[in-house]
Image: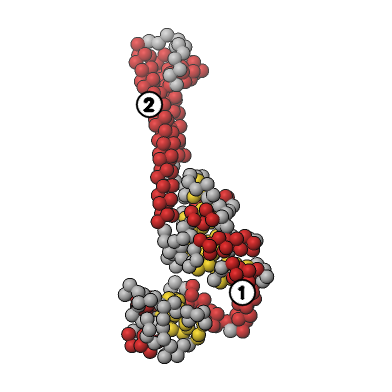
């Protein structure tokens, strides 16, 4: 069972189940040891002292359990020697039982404390991570895709059963709490996160999440899901950078697949197929980078065999497809890059201020 970590009162940090040695296996060995000891003692009393089977079983039980009752019948010298070994066997079996159970309890608590502390330290050291609020079908798919892209993901889920199930997978850092609560968002590292996906129900809950997240981190990229078209402008006003309506998106995609299926298949392959050598990514131009103030033509001279740029979002928000070569790049511009991993990595270095 997943155990909550103590700490913030508004959110509960969940950890994956501890991987301890199998308790069932240890108990099986313990049970076998008791059965062998009792059986050996019973047979020994029958053969050595000529006890009846019931008397032999009773004598074996009170001796192995060391309860201290007097002997059923007086023992001979050989019977007393045999009884010493039965007592030692019983004491050994009890000691093994106490050690096994004690080790499991103490080790479990100790490892649980260490695991919770390690998870808590990891959570508070994360930076540039993604926060997914809500782990329904949409949230689960979003979190899986972010993880597939190599990003750190923190999941905030309000339902304890769902949160525990997600934590058991060990793939995500999981907080159980209300994502619209400022304290929960702070616990998830909202001030250091680079993105947040709000995909809970109903839309009013997403609205509260977006409002709180934008207030706590003015620079974070927020993507929200809207079930109703009426909520879309409200989410934008609240601070969402993008709002996705599943009904509108599904309708448009169905229409595009009916009219131009090959184009859709190609885009899916480029965006989601790990085996593809061509990737499509967006890269922000940083102030002080080598291309700051240069045109796309100049960029092509710096990187003549690099990634292609089929699109560019200007810092004023205007989107341009197939920007002309004389387009000048500046801080805040976002280029859409198409190329291999190596070509995109080279372009990213050129657009980075650190290079």
Q: What residue sits 61% from the left and 74% below the top? A: 249
- Which residue carries the number 1 mark? 249
Q: Quadrant of residue 298?
A: bottom left
Outermost top residue: 74
Q: Is residue 251 left or right of residue 5?
A: right
- Nearer to the camera, 175 or 165: 175
Q: Quadrant of the C terminus?
A: bottom left
Q: Residue at x 47, y 77 (%)?
A: 270
Residue at the image point whose x is 43% and y is 39% from the top:
109
The reply, left or right, for residue 354 in relation to residue 334 is left
Under circle 2, the secondary element is: helix
3D distance between C-alphas at marks 1 and 2: 69 Å
Q: Which residue is mark 2?
A: 92
Q: Position of residue 338 (x, y in %)?
A: 43, 81
Look at 51% across and 57% down and name the residue there.
Answer: 185
How packed mark 1 is, by other alpha carbons closer than 10 Å (few <14, some 14-19, many 20 or more), is few
* Badge nearest the viewer, 1 or 2: 1
Instruction: Kindly state the secondary structure of the residue where label 1 is placed.
Output: helix
- Residue 354 is marked as none
Residue 205 position, x and y percent, is: 62, 60
As displayed, is residue 143 above or below residue 319?
A: above
Q: Residues within 10 Å of mark 2 (few under 14, many from 20)?
A: some
Q: Nearer the viewer, residue 216 or 36?
A: 216
User: Residue 2, relative to residue 230: is it above or below?
Assistant: above
Inspect this view and state whether residue 95 appears.
Answer: yes
Asked if residue 30 lies left or right of residue 180, the reply is left
Can residue 279 be seen in this snapshot? no
Do the numbered discs 1 and 2 sit on residues whose CB atoms are within 8 Å? Answer: no
Q: Earlier in the sequence, mark 1 or mark 2?
A: 2
Give percent across and percent down for residue 158.
Answer: 58, 53
Quadrant assignment, res 36 = top left
Foreground residue, 148 or 72? 148
């Amino acid at each position: 069972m997943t155990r909550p970590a103590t700490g913030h009162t508004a959110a509960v940090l969940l950890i994956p189940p501890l991987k301890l040695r199998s308790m069932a296996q240890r108990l099986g060995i313990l049970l076998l040891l008791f059965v062998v000891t009792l059986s050996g003692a019973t047979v020994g009393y029958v053969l050595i002292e000529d006890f009846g089977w019931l008397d032999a079983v009773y004598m074996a039980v009170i001796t192995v359990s060391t309860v201290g009752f007097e002997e059923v019948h007086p023992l001979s010298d050989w019977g007393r020697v045999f009884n010493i070994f039965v007592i030692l066997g019983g004491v050994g079996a009890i000691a093994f039982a106490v050690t096994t159970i004690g080790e499991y309890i103490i080790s479990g608590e100790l490892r649980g404390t260490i695991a919770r502390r390690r998870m808590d330290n990891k959570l508070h050291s994360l930076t540039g991570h993604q926060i997914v609020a809500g782990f329904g079908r949409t949230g689960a798919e979003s979190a899986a895709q972010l993880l597939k892209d190599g990003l750190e993901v923190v999941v905030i889920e309000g339902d304890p059963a769902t949160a525990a199930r997600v934590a058991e997978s060990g793939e995500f850092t999981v907080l159980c709490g209300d994502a619209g609560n400022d304290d929960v968002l702070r616990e998830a590292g909202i001030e250091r996160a680079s993105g947040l996906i709000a995909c809970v129900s109903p839309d009013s809950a997403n609205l509260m999440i977006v409002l709180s997240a934008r207030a706590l981190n003015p620079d974070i990229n927020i993507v929200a899901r809207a079930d109703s078209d009426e909520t879309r402008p409200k989410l934008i006003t609240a601070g969402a950078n993008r709002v996705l309506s599943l009904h509108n998106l599904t309708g448009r995609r169905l229409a595009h697949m009916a009219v131009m299926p090959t184009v859709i298949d190609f885009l899916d392959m480029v965006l989601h197929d790990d085996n593809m050598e061509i990737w499509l990514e967006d890269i922000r131009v940083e102030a002080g980078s080598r291309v700051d103030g240069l045109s796309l033509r100049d960029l092509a001279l710096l990187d003549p065999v690099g990634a292609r740029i089929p699109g560019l979002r200007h810092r004023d928000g205007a989107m341009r497809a197939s920007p002309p070569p004389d387009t000048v790049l500046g801080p805040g511009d976002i280029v859409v890059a198409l190329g291999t991993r190596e070509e995109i990595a080279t372009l990213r270095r050129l657009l980075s201020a650190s290079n």
